[in-house]
Amino acid sequence: MHSRVIVQTDDFDVAEECRALANSGRCGAVTQFVGVMRDRNEGDDIAAMELEHYPGMTERSIEAIIERAGERWPILAATVIHRVGSLLPGAQIVFVGVAAMHRQAAFSACEFIMDYLKSEAPFWKKECKADGTERWVDARDSDAQALNKW
Amino acid sequence: MITILFFAKYREQLGLGKMNFTLDTALSVGDLKKRLVSDGGEKWAEVLLADNTLCAVNQTIANDSVEINDGDEVAFYPPVTGG
């Protein structure tokens, strides 16, 4: 199983990443998830967001999640790209792509990787509201609960 | 000597992202928290003794009983909010 994990400030090209995954040998299915920055959160207009991570640990923790997905489903390759730094509403934040021989493994592994990324990978978001004030985003119980289905 | 890192909200609360700490005796994560709080006071207690504070030793999640050795990298951070 081939994995590719990147944390970067730059944007990413979804089509290019999917094409690369489709080129995995014996590939019959590619699934993708793209997380996008919302312009509203908890009733407030959000003007911008600042994302930070723990260099080294973040990448290792995502690699470990992909490895666990690979133990549960027969996947051929997985790519995770997560942006950090300053982002504006509408910006792509995260890409999770999975290649497998058949769709079920690709769908399940993609969702599994994203669910665990949200609750384990060390990233933190700070929102800059439209009124100029800033706040750190709190972790959501629903993200922790999402792991129960696995 | 060990390196201690603080991320996100905790870095701002403490006004500190990274510090060195000399280990004069073997310490667990829980011991280290108590030492830092007794040296630093209220502000440090708020960060380190919060129920949901996470700790990693050498970039692996660690609970209070994990032993810290010389040269280790210890990080404290709030619940994660990526994706």
Image (cartoon, rainbow, N blue to C red):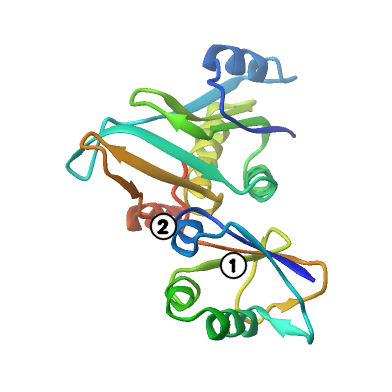
Dot 1, how many residues are within 10 Å of its Cα: few (below 14), some (14-19), or many (20+)?
Answer: many
* Residue visible at 77% across and 79% down in the picture: B23
Q: Chain of mark 1?
A: B
Q: Position of residue A23 (x, y in %)?
A: 70, 15
The relative height of residue B2 versus residue A13 in the rendered view (above or below) is below
* B19 with respect to A142 (left or right): right
In the rendering, which numbered label is found on residue A144?
Answer: 2
* Residue visible at 17% across and 42% down in the picture: A43
Question: In the rendered image, which quarter contains the N terminus of chain A?
Answer: top right
What secondary structure is marked by label 2? helix
Q: Chain of mark 2?
A: A
Query: Please, which residue is most extreme toward the right here?
Result: B70
The relative height of residue A16 versus residue B33 in the rendered view (above or below) is above
Residue holding disc 1: B55
* B82 with respect to B68 (left or right): left
Rounded to the nearest angstrom, the CA distance separating label 2 from label 1 is 18 Å
What secondary structure is marked by label 1? strand
